[in-house]
Image (cartoon, rainbow, N blue to C red):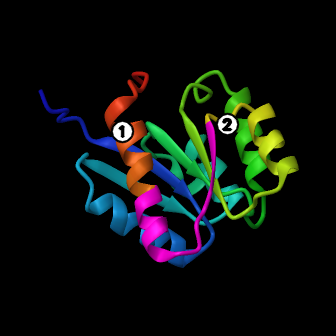
Amino acid sequence: MENLKVIEILLIEDNIGDARLTMEALKEGKVKNNLTVVYDGVEATDFLFRRNKHILATRPDLILLDLNLPKKNGREVLAEIKKDENLRRIPIVVLTTSRSEEDILSAYNLHANCYITKPIDLGKFLSMVQSIEDFWLTLVQLPNK
């Protein structure tokens, strides 16, 4: 039986081009989803903790997190999410350009669920987003809110 639930995805990404590509790739996908994009770390935590203009924000089922964000970096955002009793079970896919071993270790030490380096090639980028959808939204059983 096909899953009729709409999956809520929060994309935390400061690169407008990458955000747009991710939106397009997910639009073409098999799973109904609602993608919300925030462009910096402060807005991300406001969204997740329902502060300021995000008081009515919907809790995401999955978070796609860039590490290199303005105002508050992705590591700080990740640490805040994983410290919070209500948010820590949301799977977080770190999606970044960094191939640094230090960044990879840091992300996993902060309890990221996986770490993916963004490909530069457009076709590979779209394929990567599709792979995320196939795995996280089709195969994996996400926790109920």
**Residue labelled with disc 2:** 112
**Residue labelled with disc 1:** 137
Image position of 84 with respect to 9: above or below: above
Which is more toward the observer, 54 or 122?
122
* The image quarter in which residue 106 lies: top right
Q: Where is residue 115 in the image (x, y as percent from the top left)?
A: 65, 45
Left or right? Give the position of 15 relative to 27.
right
Crowding at dot 1, Cα within 10 Å, few <14 / some 14-19 / many 20+, comes out as many
Residue for point 53% across, 71% down: 18
Image position of 62 with respect to 21: above or below: above
- Provide the secondary structure element on which disc 2 rests: loop
Q: In the rendered image, is residue 143 in sight? A: yes
* The image quarter in which residue 3 lies: top left
Q: Position of residue 140 (x, y in %)?
A: 40, 28
Q: In the rendered image, is residue 36 in sight? A: no
Crowding at dot 2, Cα within 10 Å, few <14 / some 14-19 / many 20+, comes out as many
Which is more toward the observer, 107 or 131?
131
The reply to whether the magenta stretch includes residue 87 is: no
Badge 1 or badge 2: first in the primary sequence: 2
Image position of 95 with respect to 60: above or below: below
Image position of 108 with respect to 123: above or below: above
Which residues are drawn in magenta? 114-128
Residue for point 33% across, 52% down: 34
Left or right? Give the position of 21 relative to 6.
right
Residue for point 36% across, 39% down: 137
Q: In which quarter of the image is the C terminus?
A: top left
Which is more toward the observer, 128 or 57?
128
| Kind of residue at disc 1 | Leu
- Provide the secondary structure element on which disc 1 rests: helix
Estimate the spatial distance between the alpha carbons at disc 1 and disc 2, rounded to whole Å: 17 Å
Farthest residue toward the left? Answer: 1
| Kind of residue at disc 2 | Ala
